[in-house]
Image: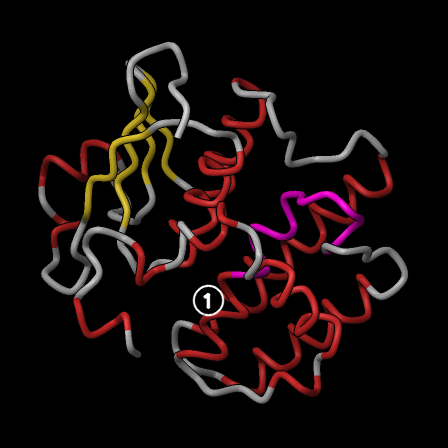
Amino acid sequence: MAESGESKLKLYSYWRSSCSQRVRIALNLKGLDYEYIPVNLLKGEQKNPDFLKLNPLGYVPALVDGEIVIADSFAILMYLEEKYPQHPLLPSDLQKKALNHQASNVVCSNIQPLQNIAVLSHINKGFAALEKLLKDCAGKYATGDEVSMADLFIEPQILGAIKRFNIDMTQFPLLSRLHEAYSELPAFQNAMPENQPDAPPSSVTS
């Protein structure tokens, strides 16, 4: 990863967190060097007083950039987009930019919270909504032929659906095609849960 030219960014992350994964992808795409600081959610490390100073809600991810602390993955992505404009995550076209926000919100509001508690019918509903939303604008990736913010939100949820809940993705051909495209990108592969330093050895084969 390339140096940012300033003090190294610090990312407080949990290997299996989809919110953390989308931030890891963004950091990789932008070529930003960062220190990975694991927060073991199963051990309750997110409730430690030192971490609660960074995020009083006790959620990962949290990003520290010098004196600046940002918690919440969407806020982190917008911060990175503003400060580090290389490899932009949002297209300049207003319609495509709006589609990126809309697709990201479908994940945040309708898939991710429910995926965490395995309400599979709602996950399927969210995936179906993404298929309809993106069918007329998708190129190689979600909203065109360049990776954008929507892709960072979508891929972690597809991975979770496949690996954790065994959802049949053949009913979602567009998302399946995107998943194959993401699998060819080092920025996405390096951000995968099993490739994180705090991932247990068993996750590599899970």
Q: Which residue is mark 1?
A: 113
Q: Is residue 139 magenta?
A: no
Give the SS element for disc 1.
helix
* Horizontal side of residue 66 vs 45, given as left or right: right
What's the magenta region? 142-155
Residue at (39, 80) in percent of width and height: 164
Image quadrant containing the N terminus: top left
**Is residue 154 inside the magenta stretch?**
yes
Q: Mark 1 belongs to which amino acid?
A: Pro
Q: Residues within 10 Å of mark 1 (few under 14, many from 20)?
A: some
On screen, residue 167 versus residue 60, left or right, reads right
Left or right of residue 37: residue 137: right
Where residue 155 sits, quadrant-wise, is: bottom right
Residue 16 coordinates in the image, percent (x, y): 32, 62
Residue 44, percent across and down? 12, 58
Disc tally is 1
Q: Is residue 194 left or right of residue 170?
A: left
Q: Quadrant of the C terminus?
A: bottom left
Q: Residue at image x 62%, y 83%?
A: 169
Q: Which residue is at 62% across, 82% downward?
A: 124
Q: Nearer the viewer, residue 183 or 175?
A: 183
